[in-house]
Image: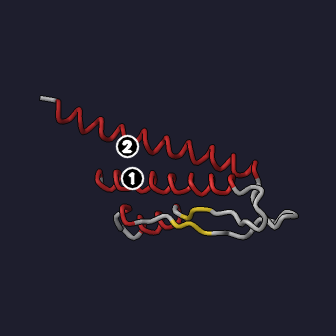
C-alpha cells in the first residue's frame, strides 16, 4: 500500500505540473485569435486505475481541448478569471501532493534512524 501511495502522489505531481503548463499556455494565448484552451484529464483515469487495482504509476495525464466554452469575438475561448481560479486550485493540489510525499519520506527516514 505504501508503494501505491507514493506512486499515486508521484502521478498526481506529474499531472499537476502538466496542468500548470496547460493553464500557463491558455493565459499566454488570452488574446490569440482562434486559440482554443487546453485542459488536462487525469482524475478520471486515476480513479479507473485504482478501482481496477492497477498501479497509479502507469496512469498518464492527457492534454485535450474541451471546446465547450463559448467563443469571444476573436474566436478564442480563454477566460482569464477561470484560468486564474484553475491555477490557484492546481497550485494548492500540487502543494498538497508535495507535502504528503515529503511526510511519507520523513516517516521512512525516522524509521531508519530509530534504533
Number of the label disc, if any, that sits on residue 21: none
In the image, residue 84 lies at what x, y percent? 69, 46
Alpha-carbon neighbours of circle 1 within 10 Å: few (<14), some, or many (≥20)? some
Q: Residue at x 65, y 69 (%)?
A: 65
> Which element type, helix, strand or loop, lies under badge 1?
helix
Q: What coloring was used for the rendering?
A: secondary structure
In this picture, residue 52 sits left or right of residue 22: left
> Between residues 49 and 23, which one lies in front from this camera angle?
23
Say above or below: 82 vs 73.
Answer: above
Q: Residue at x 56, y 44 (%)?
A: 91
Q: Residue at x 56, y 66 (%)?
A: 63
Instruction: Report the quarter where the C terminus lies.
Output: top left
Q: Residue at x 53, y 46 (%)?
A: 93
Quarter of the image for residue 64 reads bottom right
Disc 1 + disc 2, Cβ < 8 Å: yes
Considering only order in the chain, which callout, 2 or 1, is on the residue closer to the N terminus?
Answer: 1
Q: How many marks?
A: 2
> Between residues 100 and 26, which one lies in front from this camera angle?
26
> Between residues 94 and 51, which one lies in front from this camera angle?
94
Q: Residue furthest left?
A: 115
Alpha-carbon neighbours of circle 2 within 10 Å: few (<14), some, or many (≥20)? some
In this picture, residue 84 sits left or right of residue 57: right
> Which element type, helix, strand or loop, lies under badge 2?
helix
Number of the label disc, if any, that sits on residue 101: 2
In the image, residue 62 lies at what x, y percent? 52, 67
In the image, residue 110 lies at what x, y percent? 23, 32
**What's the CA distance linking mark 1 and mark 2?**
8 Å
Residue at which label 1 appears: 10
In this picture, residue 104 sits left or right of residue 93: left
Instruction: Report the quarter where the N terminus lies.
Output: bottom left
Quarter of the image for residue 71 reads bottom right
Amino acid at each position: 500500500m505504501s508503494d501505491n501511495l507514493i506512486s499515486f502522489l508521484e502521478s498526481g505531481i506529474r499531472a499537476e505540473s502538466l496542468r500548470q503548463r496547460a493553464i500557463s499556455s491558455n493565459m499566454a494565448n488570452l488574446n490569440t485569435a482562434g486559440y482554443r484552451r487546453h485542459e488536462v484529464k487525469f482524475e478520471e483515469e486515476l480513479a479507473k486505475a485504482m478501482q481496477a487495482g492497477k498501479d497509479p504509476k502507469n496512469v498518464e495525464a492527457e492534454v485535450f481541448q474541451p471546446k465547450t466554452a463559448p467563443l469571444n469575438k476573436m474566436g478564442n475561448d480563454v477566460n482569464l478569471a477561470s484560468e486564474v481560479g484553475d491555477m490557484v486550485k492546481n497550485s494548492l493540489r500540487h502543494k498538497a501532493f508535495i507535502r504528503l510525499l515529503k511526510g511519507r519520506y520523513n516517516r521512512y527516514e525516522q524509521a531508519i534512524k530509530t534504533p
